[in-house]
Structure formats: C-alpha cells, structure tokens
Amino acid sequence: MEDWLTTFEAAQISGYNPDYIRQLIRTKKIQGRKWGLSWQVNRESLQLHMSTAEKIGERRGPKHKPDAKRR
C-alpha cells in the first residue's frame, strides 16, 4: 500500500520548503497527486529523492577553479 503525505508533512520530513516540494512534483522528480485542492506526495519517492540529492550534494562544488589573477 502506498503512503501519501501532504506537501506540509513532506516539507517537515525533508526540511524542504513546501514550494520546493511542489516544484519537485511539477518537474516529476518526485511522485505527487492532486487530492481536492491540495497536493500529496508519495513518501517513497520523496525519500529516494532525498537520498539521491544527498549523494549529489557531496559532489557539488565550483565548476571551475578560481583564477587567482582575476580581481
């Protein structure tokens, strides 16, 4: 059985802003559905996204080395 959360609950669990949760739904990075006037988030897809984002976050950094000559 699938477990669904409100965007507010998803924001509390993930630490993301509710607007960002809705953006993730729109861009299909997490699974969401419209229920009445509000959106719901699939808990498993949110957790998968969070673990993937955490791994990517460890690799993030400057795209190029800073040029010491620039000022």
Image: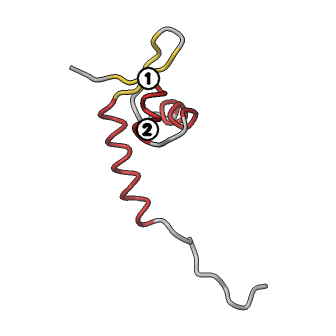
- Determine whether the residue tagged by mark 1 lies in a helix, strand or loop: strand
Residue 43 appears in which quarter of the rendering?
top left
Q: Is residue 35 above or below residue 47?
A: above
**Three-letter amino acid code of the residue under disc 2:** Lys
When the figure is inspected, residue 3 is found, relative to residue 36, above or below; the finding is below
The residue sitting at the top extreme is: 36
The chosen color scheme is secondary structure
Report x, y in % for residue 44: 29, 34
Of tags 1 and 2, which is closer to the observer?
1
Seen at 50% across and 34% down, the residue is: 21
Residue labelled with disc 1: 6
Q: Looking at the rendering, which quadrant does residue 58 occupy?
A: bottom left
Question: In the picture, residue 20 is in which quadrant?
Answer: top right
Circle on res. 64: none
Measuring from the top left, give residue 57's x and y in whole percent. 44, 60
Give the quarter of the figure containing the N terminus. Answer: top left
Residue lying at the far bottom of the rendered structure: 69
Circles 1 and 2 in contact, beta carbons < 8 Å: no
Please name the amino acid that badge 1 sits on: Thr
How far is the residue under mark 1 from the one under mark 2?
Answer: 16 Å
- Residue at image coords 36%, 58%: 55
Residue 51, given in percent of the width and then of the height, sits at 33, 49
Please give the name of the residue rendered at 41% of the width and 34% of the height, measured from the top-left corner: 30
| Residue picked out by circle 2 | 29
Q: Residues within 10 Å of mark 2 (few under 14, many from 20)?
A: some
In x, y percent, where is residue 40?
Answer: 43, 21
